[in-house]
Each structure stands twice: as structure tokens, then as C-alpha cells.
Image (cartoon, rainbow, N blue to C red):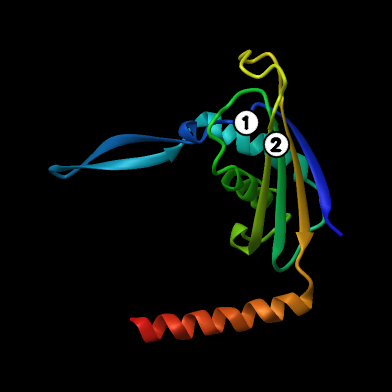
């Protein structure tokens, strides 16, 4: 049985998650990628929903139902959710999210900017131990096949 969490606020578009600036090192410039303040606030707001929740060990399946007030680019919504789950200590690492299912809906009055909050319904379901054994065997086979290819 999964655990369900509900968050309301404004979902940040993927395009606003990272910024870049040039830094001079010696006689060269390198690009530095950083999380924007908007992304940090979004991630912190999401993690507040998970604070104090029981830590889950092992793999989990993630289901996200979104009701959005605008047609923002939310194609990678699992990234801030995974980061927020880690930040809150609910999962050890977002690499333990096995499957992700998205259901995207739009508010009937979408397009009226900043008038309505977005809604995320996030369900986490621990992967049963017997399925974990199957995953481990599959990973060993995948690694073996990858070594054969290389």
C-alpha cells in the first residue's frame, strides 16, 4: 500500500530550474550551472510536505497526478520530487525510484496566469522484497550483457 502526499503551489517550469554563468579560470572561461532561487524554493516547498514522514528503504514506485493552472513544461517533474524526497529524508537517494507514472490534467480555467494554484498528488509505493530480488538479477544480467558489448 502506498503513501499519498498532496502539495499545492506553483509548479516551476523545467526551463526555470537552472541558470548558468561564465567564470574565468586562468585564461579560460568555464560555464557554471547552478540551481535557481525559484527551483530551490519549489524544492523546499515540496520537501516540506514530506518532512517527518517515515523513511522508506529500498526501491519505490512513484505516481504523480498533476492538476496544473498553466501549460508549463513539467516533463521532468520527477527531478524536484526526487530531490525533495531526499531532502526530507523519506528516501535515501532518488535513484531508488523504480517506476514513475504521470497523470497530467489542466484546471478548467488554465491560461489565467497566477490565478490558481497547481495541485500535485504524489503516491509512493515500496517495492516488495520478492520483486527486489528480480530487479537485482536483472541488473546483474544487464551488466553482464553490457560488458559483452563493450
The answer to whether the residue labelled 2 contacts the one labelled 1, judged by CB atoms less than 8 Å apart, is: yes
- Crowd rating for badge 2 (residues with CA inside 10 Å; few <14, some 14–19, many 20+): many
Q: Position of residue 74 (x, y in %)?
A: 57, 37
Front label number (2 vs 1): 2
Image quadrant where residue 108 sits: top right
Name the element at disc 2.
strand
66 on left or right of 147: right
Q: How many marks?
A: 2
Identify the residue shown where x is 66% and y is 23%.
Answer: 69
- Crowd rating for badge 1 (residues with CA inside 10 Å; few <14, some 14–19, many 20+): many
Q: Position of residue 64 (x, y in %)?
A: 71, 45
Q: Quadrant of the N terminus?
A: bottom right
Residue under label 2: 66
Considering every residue shown, the one lying at the far right of the view is 1
Considering every residue shown, the one lying at the far left of the view is 27
Q: Nearer the viewer, residue 149 or 38?
A: 149
Q: Position of residue 22 (x, y in %)?
A: 27, 36
24 on left or right of 135: left
Please tell me whether residue 87 is drawn above or below residue 67 in the rendered image: below
The numbered mark at residue 11 is: 1
Identify the residue shown where x is 68% and y is 50%.
Answer: 85
Q: Position of residue 97 (x, y in %)?
A: 65, 60
Identify the residue shown where x is 38% and y is 41%.
Answer: 33
Q: Nearer the viewer, residue 70 or 22?
A: 70
Q: Nearer the viewer, residue 142 or 81?
A: 142
Please tell me whether residue 39 is drawn above or below residue 110 in the rendered image: below
Name the element at disc 1.
loop
Amino acid at each position: 500500500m502506498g503513501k499519498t502526499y498532496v502539495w499545492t503551489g506553483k509548479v516551476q517550469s523545467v526551463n526555470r530550474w537552472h541558470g548558468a554563468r561564465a567564470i574565468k579560470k586562468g585564461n579560460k572561461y568555464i560555464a557554471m550551472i547552478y540551481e535557481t532561487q525559484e527551483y530551490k524554493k519549489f524544492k523546499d516547498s515540496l520537501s516540506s510536505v514530506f518532512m517527518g514522514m517515515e523513511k522508506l528503504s529500498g526501491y519505490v514506485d512513484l505516481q504523480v497526478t498533476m492538476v496544473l493552472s498553466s501549460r508549463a513544461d513539467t516533463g521532468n517533474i520527477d527531478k524536484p520530487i526526487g530531490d525533495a524526497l531526499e531532502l526530507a529524508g523519506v528516501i535515501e537517494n532518488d535513484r531508488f525510484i523504480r517506476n514513475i507514472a504521470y497523470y497530467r490534467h489542466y484546471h478548467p480555467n488554465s491560461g489565467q496566469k497566477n490565478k490558481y494554484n497547481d495541485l500535485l498528488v504524489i503516491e509512493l509505493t515500496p517495492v516488495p522484497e520478492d520483486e527486489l530480488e528480480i530487479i537485482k538479477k536483472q541488473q546483474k544480467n544487464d551488466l553482464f550483457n553490457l560488458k559483452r558489448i563493450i
